[in-house]
Image: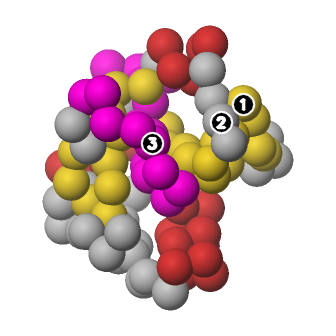
Amino acid sequence: CYSLLRDWYAQERSIELSDFARLDEWWLRGDNLYVENFARAGFAPVEAGTDLQEGDVLLMQIASPVPNHAAIYLGDGLILHHLQGRLSSRDVYGGYWHKVTTHVLRHHAL
């Protein structure tokens, strides 16, 4: 899902994000890729209660001890994300996706 995030930011915002080294299932190997690197990639947490805006990144924790999934908020209640072993998709942000969200991040250029 991080590759999709990098591609979206490059294509839609002309922002090049670093490509952090990572192994498959890094979250099960004791790594915390998103939390350890979001500031270095130019992101900062969004205050609770702040309205989402297009391009915000939603970190999610799915069957993991740490946030291991990211989605991009597209506006109009939609997210773009890529789950391991599936095709990238747009989904409605709510229900399950909202429940597993741990962080909302915004790039400093936005």
Residue 38: % across, % down:
25, 56
Q: CA distance from mark 2 to mark 3?
A: 9 Å
Residue 67: % across, % down:
36, 32
Q: Which residue type carries mark 2? A: Gly
Label 3 SS: loop
Give the residue drawn at x 26%, y 43%.
46
Against 97, residue 36 (above or below) is: below
Q: Is residue 74 visible to the viewer in this orientation of the structure?
A: yes
> What residue is shown with label 2?
77
Give the residue drawn at x 60%, y 14%.
96
Q: Which mark is residue 92?
A: 1
Residue 75: % across, % down:
62, 48
> What residue is shown with label 3?
52
Q: Which residues are magenta?
A: 48-66
Dot 3: within a 10 Å radius of its alpha carbon, few (fewer than 14), some, or many (20 or more) residues?
some
Against 47, residue 61 (above or below) is: above
Give the residue drawn at x 75%, y 35%.
91
Dot 1: within a 10 Å radius of its alpha carbon, few (fewer than 14), some, or many (20 or more) residues?
some
* CB within 8 Å, label 1 to label 2: yes
Q: Which residue type carries mark 3? A: Leu
Earlier in the chain: of badge 1 and badge 2, it is: 2
Give the residue drawn at x 21%, y 37%.
47
